[in-house]
Amino acid sequence: MAKTIIEEGSAESAKGGRNFKTSQDVEAFYRFVHENGLRREARTVLESVHAKIKEINKKSKKRGRKKLQ
């Protein structure tokens, strides 16, 4: 059973990061947040994750730039 979950997750990640809303895990997360009234807490968590990803992407862009003389 665990093997099928891993295979599904790798297939979802292969589709690209933009299709994350169709993920079963994300749907379960949204349902959990709604049922338990955790909107404020979920927002703070998602904002911190987004900030961390943005920081990583910014660092990778800086490394890739080459200065021309």
Image: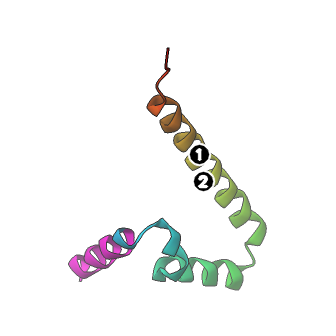
Q: Tell me: 41 left or right of 32.
A: right
Residue at horizontal 59 percent and vertical 40 percent from the top: 55
Residue under pointer 2:
49
Element at badge 1? helix
Give the total number of marks visible in the rendering: 2
Q: In this view, does 42 lie above or below 57?
A: below
Q: Which residue lies furthest to the right in this view?
A: 40
Crowd class of label 2 (few under 14; some 14 to 19; many from 20; radius 10 Å): few
Q: In this view, does 63 lie above or below 34?
A: above
Distance from label 2 to label 1 (Cα)? Answer: 5 Å
Q: Which of 46 and 19 is in front in this view?
A: 19
Q: Which span is picked out in magenta?
A: 1-13
Residue at horizontal 21 percent and vertical 77 percent from the top: 3
Whether 48 is among the magenta residues is no
Tell me which corner region of the image, top left, top right, bottom left or bottom right, holds residue 34: bottom right
Element at badge 2? helix
Q: Where is residue 19 in the image (x, y as percent from the top left)?
A: 50, 75
Q: Residue furthest front?
A: 69
Q: In this view, does 59 lie above or below 53?
A: above
Crowd class of label 1 (few under 14; some 14 to 19; many from 20; radius 10 Å): few
Residue at horizontal 38 percent and vertical 73 percent from the top: 15
Check contact, mark 2 vs mark 1: CB within 8 A.
Answer: yes
Res 28 label: none
What's the residue type where badge 1 is placed?
Lys
Q: Position of residue 6 (x, y in %)?
A: 28, 73
Give the main secondary structure of the magenta stretch: helix
Residue under pointer 1:
52
Tell me which corner region of the image, top left, top right, bottom left or bottom right, holds residue 30: bottom right
Q: Nearer the viewer, residue 38 or 10?
A: 10
Q: Position of residue 44 (x, y in %)?
A: 72, 57
Whether 5 is among the magenta residues is yes
